[in-house]
Amino acid sequence: MLAKRILVIDDEKNLCSVIKICLEHIGGWQVLIAQSGSEGLLLAETELPDAILLDIMMPDMDGLVLLRALRINPVTRRIPVILLTAKTQPVDSNQSAHLGVLEVIPKPFDPLELVDQVALVLGWE
C-alpha cells in the first residue's frame, strides 16, 4: 500500500522542516510542503493529498480563506483538513465545523506527538 500523503501549508520554513521530518520518519508518510496559501491551493488541486495541515495566519492568503477555496472546489472539497494555529483566540468552532475542519492543533505543539495526533484524528493506524 502506498504511504499516505500530507500537504503542510505554513509560511514558517523551519516549522515546515520539523513537521516534514517528524511525519516522514515517525509516521512513514509522504509530506508535501507549501509555504503560501496560493502554493498550497495549487498543490492541493494537482497532488490530491490524503490530508492537509493548514496554518491559519499566512501573509498572502489567510488559512480560512484558503480553506473556503478548497471546499468550493469539487476536486479538493473532500480532503480532510487539520488546522495549525498560533492564534491566541480560539478558532470559531461553528465556522471551522462548517468548513469541515477535523481538528485544531495549537502552536506550539510537540513535534514528536504530532504523528499520533494526526493519525488519531484521521483514523490512520
Image (cartoon, rainbow, N blue to C red):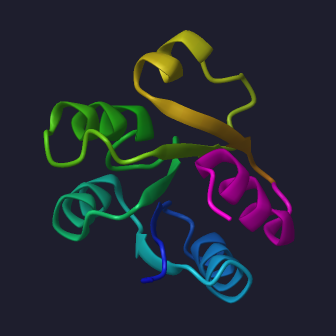
Pick the front one: 125 or 49: 125
> The C terminus is located in which quarter?
bottom right
Most foreground residue, 116 or 95: 116
Q: Residue furthest front?
A: 1
- Dominant SS of magenta comes to helix
Position of 97 compared to 41: left or right? Answer: right
Coordinates of residue 91 in the picture (x, y in percent): 62, 23
Residue 30 position in % (x across, y down): 48, 81
- 27 lies above or below 36: below
In which image quadrant can residue 24 be found? Answer: bottom right
Question: For the point 74% across and 82% down, which residue is it?
Answer: 26
Q: Is residue 103 magenta?
A: no
Residue 72 at x, y percent in the picture: 18, 31
Whether the magenta-drawn stretch holds residue 119 is answered as yes
Q: What stretch of residues is rendered in magenta?
A: 109-125
Using residue 39 as the reference point, say whether residue 123 is left or right of it. right
